[in-house]
């Protein structure tokens, strides 16, 4: 079964000072151990790189790109996905739901994914089951 991975999970995984770091490390390892198919979008990859570079520096970006991203299937946002995400953004009328979140919801729905590894409450609000695993 597939799990969509959000920027919030990637960031928690990479930042040892993040409040969710330990839980993210445990969840990540369990997902890998169980060979779950991990998916994110290219927009999530870009958002994560920008956030890591801004907050933690280029070395964290290098680690993310070389150690984390290779085990994740990156789905590219198509023109149709982009348009559907814009439509969703305007339809929801919610200022706090980002355009990148909307692209994630569109891609996850396209791929039939109902589970998300994230620390963003919007995924649950949009009907996703949140994955937080501990040993």
Image (cartoon, rainbow, N blue to C red):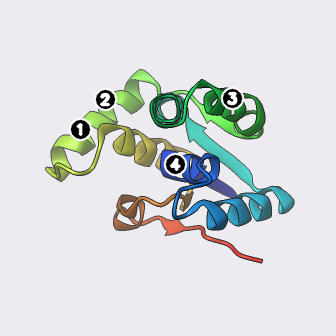
Q: Are discs 2 and 3 less than 8 Å apart at CB? A: no
Name the residue tied to disc 1: 87
Compare marks 4 and 1 and give the one earlier in the sequence: 4
Compare marks 2 and 4 and give the one earlier in the sequence: 4
Q: Where is residue 32 in the image (x, y as percent from the top left)?
A: 80, 55
Q: Nearer the viewer, residue 58 or 110?
A: 58
Q: Position of residue 12 (x, y in %)?
A: 56, 53
Name the residue tied to disc 2: 83
Task: Say which of marks 2 and 4 sits in front.
Answer: 4
Compare marks 4 and 3 and give the one earlier in the sequence: 4
> Residue 6: which disc?
4
Q: Which residue is drawn at 62% across and 29% down?
A: 61
Q: Position of residue 16 (x, y in %)?
A: 62, 53
Give the structural element (helix, strand or loop) at label 1. helix
Q: Which of 35 and 16 is in front in this view?
A: 16
Q: Residues within 10 Å of mark 1 (few under 14, many from 20)?
A: few
Task: Say which of marks 4 and 1 sits in front.
Answer: 4
Relative placement, left or right, of 71 versus 130 is right
Q: Distance between the residues labelled 2 and 3?
A: 28 Å
Name the residue tied to disc 3: 65
């Amino acid at each position: 079964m597939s799990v969509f991975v959000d920027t919030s999970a990637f960031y928690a995984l990479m930042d040892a000072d993040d409040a969710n770091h330990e839980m993210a490390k445990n969840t990540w390892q369990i997902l890998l151990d169980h060979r779950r198919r991990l998916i994110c979008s290219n927009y999530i990859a870009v958002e994560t790189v920008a956030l890591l570079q801004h907050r933690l520096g280029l070395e964290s970006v290098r680690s993310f790109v070389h150690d984390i991203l290779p085990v994740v299937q990156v789905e590219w946002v198509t023109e149709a996905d982009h348009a559907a995400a814009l439509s969703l953004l305007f339809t929801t009328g919610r200022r706090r739901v980002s355009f990148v979140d909307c692209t994630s919801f569109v891609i996850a729905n396209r791929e039939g994914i109902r589970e998300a590894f994230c620390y963003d409450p919007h995924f649950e609000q949009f009907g996703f089951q949140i994955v937080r695993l501990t040993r």
